[in-house]
Image (cartoon, grey):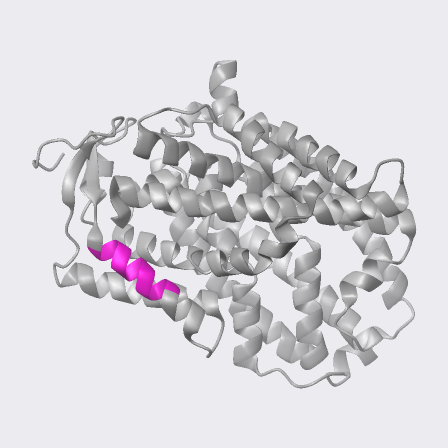
Amino acid sequence: MSSTQGVDDYALERVPAGARYSWWSVCVQRFGQLSCLSQFLIGATLGFGMSFWSAVLAITLGSVILEVVAIFTGIAGQREGLSTSVLTRWTGFGRYGSSLVGLAIALSLIGWFGVQSAISARGLTELIGVLPTWGWALVFGMAVTGIVMYGFGSMAWTAYITVPAFLLLAGYAVISELSKHSLSDLVSSPAPGPQISLAAGTTLVAGGFIVGMVMTPDMTRFNRSTSDVVKQTFVGVTIGEYVIALVGVLLAHAVGTSDIIGIVTSSAGLLGTLIIVASTVKINDWNLYSASLGVVNFGKTVFGVKLHRGLVTLTVGGIGSVLAAAGILEKFTDFLIVLGVAFPPLAGIIIAEYFFVKLWRSDLDESGDDLPAGCPTWVPTTLVVWGLSWAVGYYVDFGIASINALVASFVLYLVAGKLGLVRPLGISRTGTAQPADDQHA
């Protein structure tokens, strides 16, 4: 494997068998996404409004939803060796629909990359000083950018360092607090805050990381087998949710508040800041990685230009870092949340098309190690389903928006596919931006 390929990380092609990794290497990164401060917050929210055993049940049910989505999208990514944005060309969206997917991914994740960089920058400013907050935002953002430029292998080694560091540091802070209380009393104590129903608790757990499950093919395209996908999903999601979220539940019962992040990070100046940094690095590298893949796919499908993923990473990482330094991104949080509702329907459509409707599954199966010769130019029905599901997620007040959008997209696409309403509008040759003949490739 050449150095150029290693940096470009097969952004627009299938990951070959020789470039794939052990399931454990991928699992560590999956677990790293889940072992973060946001999971502590979800657990604390559950613990503040639920008894311990009710919270356990909510975490169990929510984890099952996450695992089902991750396994289905992950197996599709593993079998085809393709990123989410490229895979969508043959899972219902077509060439230009996939470019919209890539653009949505890029805009959202560049934004969240900047938000996370700003969080770490504030902690580093308080602890070290020397540079102003905007200076640390640039330093932190570009440091993560450097890691992501060198692709999956570099990110794997980063996870080997940051995951244990986060667990040790956060574990010390948590144990310091929990040691002041009786474990049996915490387990049997009632919820200290307003009651949360089991349905609400379950959707809170599932909705808290559903976007990460949608992006699973970006990760599982480096897996060697479907069994590896299942193993890493079960281990990464189950341990991530139970270890981190249940600790949050116990902390909420111990201190009688859901503001656990403040408790953990304020336990000691240096310790608290290191927890923030270790947690942020593990999330931010995948934010930037998936964003770069989305931009590369957008450039190829719309303009017919193959952008180098490493250079794209440097560019979008720089943009995210500058925006974080300028403090602009805080004003766009609502926009980013609205855009985030667009992601769950992608998973519903991918699963419905790849495993059930299968209009383009034969194209993928028959192309071997190469990409299919052609793909649909547009699939209007899919865009309608995507838009309707997005609206369901945004406007329906019942439950959690992301889960509502996911279920709506799966059902709508499945029904439309079985009724023969999902039809391509034109065929495009793979590797070009020009339509091919009307003949199905």
Q: Is residue 11 visible?
A: yes
Judge from the rendering whether residue 18 lies leftward or rightward of residue 53; answer left or right.
left
Give coordinates of residue 418: x percent, y percent.
16, 62
**Residue located 28% across and 67% down the image:** 411
The kind of secondary structure the magenta stretch mainly shows is helix
Residue 382 forms part of the magenta stretch: yes
Q: Quadrant of residue 392?
A: bottom left
Q: Quadrant of residue 265?
A: bottom right
**Residue located 53% across and 46% down the image:** 109
Judge from the rendering whether residue 178 lies leftward or rightward of residue 101; answer left or right.
right
Judge from the rendering whether residue 214 lies leftward or rightward of residue 359; answer left or right.
right
Report how many numbered discs are placed on residues in the image: 0
Q: Quadrant of residue 13?
A: top left
User: Where 257 sits versus 106, above or below?
Assistant: below
**Residue located 81% across and 62% down the image:** 262
Give coordinates of residue 388: x percent, y percent.
31, 65
User: Where 250 sits versus 427, above or below?
Assistant: below
User: Where 187 sits versus 23, above or below?
Assistant: below
Judge from the rendering whether residue 321 lies leftward or rightward of residue 110; answer left or right.
right
User: Where 197 sits versus 432, above or below?
Assistant: below
* Quadrant into which the C terminus falls: top left
Q: Which of 359 and 436 lies nearest the eye of the viewer? A: 436
Residue 396 forms part of the magenta stretch: no
**Residue located 59% across and 57% down the image:** 333
Q: Which of 317 and 375 lies nearest the eye of the viewer? A: 317
Give coordinates of residue 434: x percent, y percent.
20, 29
Q: Which of 209 and 73 lies nearest the eye of the viewer? A: 209
Give coordinates of residue 229: x percent, y percent.
46, 45
Q: Which of 323 and 306 lies nearest the eye of the viewer? A: 323
Q: Is residue 27 visible?
A: no
Look at the image and give the residue range highlighted in magenta: 381-390
